[in-house]
Image (cartoon, helix red, strand yellow):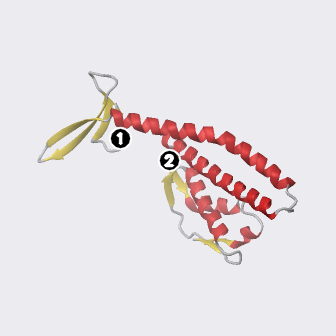
Amino acid sequence: LKGSKDKKLFSMLSPVDANIILQFKMVEYGISQRLIIAQDVTQQRNMEMMRKNFVDNVSHELRTPLTVLKGYLETLQDMDEGDSVLMTRSIEQMNGQTLRMQSLVDDLLLLARLETKRNNSQCVNIPELISNICLESNLTGENKNRIHFSIESDAGIHGVEDDLRSAFTNLIVNALKYSQQDKDVHVI
């Protein structure tokens, strides 16, 4: 028996055929009356599993060739002495597209991980988390001086700390990256 957060919705293997997954939903109507609706969700679950496996396999299969491409492009960049503007621009564009593809693969892997990961949510102290992010070593130099942290609340968010850290880090890094260099970033 596989339950859900909604106590009136649950799934189980069919007692007649173990290859069939049935989903039951209980709907209240009238006074002390219930209606149970059964639905075969086998195909839907199989499609979800196929999609998840496809995303996972494609992501892993693309990672290796992208790593090789990145390595060769870095070598070409190191060898480029700037004699050919066309060559320099081509290498920069190839490197940019390789990084873009790497980002897409990383997003696919993250999606697959989030779909299969057990929910380890807890109450996360957001002011402390964001303060730690602002103090991290990857926010150094001029960027570190551009961040102004002033959260007056001590509220927490119920969630997975690593995922919240990743989301807030992306927001702060993007704010620094896409704002003018002479503008400060306020985290409030």
Percent coordinates x, y for residue 5 in the rendering: 36, 44
Q: Residue type at mark 1?
A: Ser
Percent coordinates x, y for residue 140 in the rendering: 75, 64
Q: Residue at x 71, y 78 (%)?
A: 182
- Residue pointed to by mark 2: 121
User: Is residue 99 shown above or below 64?
Assistant: below
Q: Which of the two residues, 4 or 53, is positioned nearer the viewer here? A: 53
Task: State left or right for residue 118 relative to residue 13.
Answer: right
Tag 2 and tag 1, C-beta contact below 8 Å: no
Q: Which of the two residues, 26 or 13, is positioned nearer the viewer here? A: 13
Percent coordinates x, y for residue 2 in the rendering: 36, 33
Q: Residue at x 57, y 49 (%)?
A: 107
Q: Secondary structure at mark 2?
A: loop
Which residue in the rendered view is the most extreme toward the left? 31
Closer to the N terminus: mark 2 or mark 1?
1
Of the two numbered discs 2 and 1 in the rendering, the one whose residue sits closer to the viewer: 1
Q: Residue at x 50, y 47 (%)?
A: 121
Q: Which mark is residue 4?
A: 1
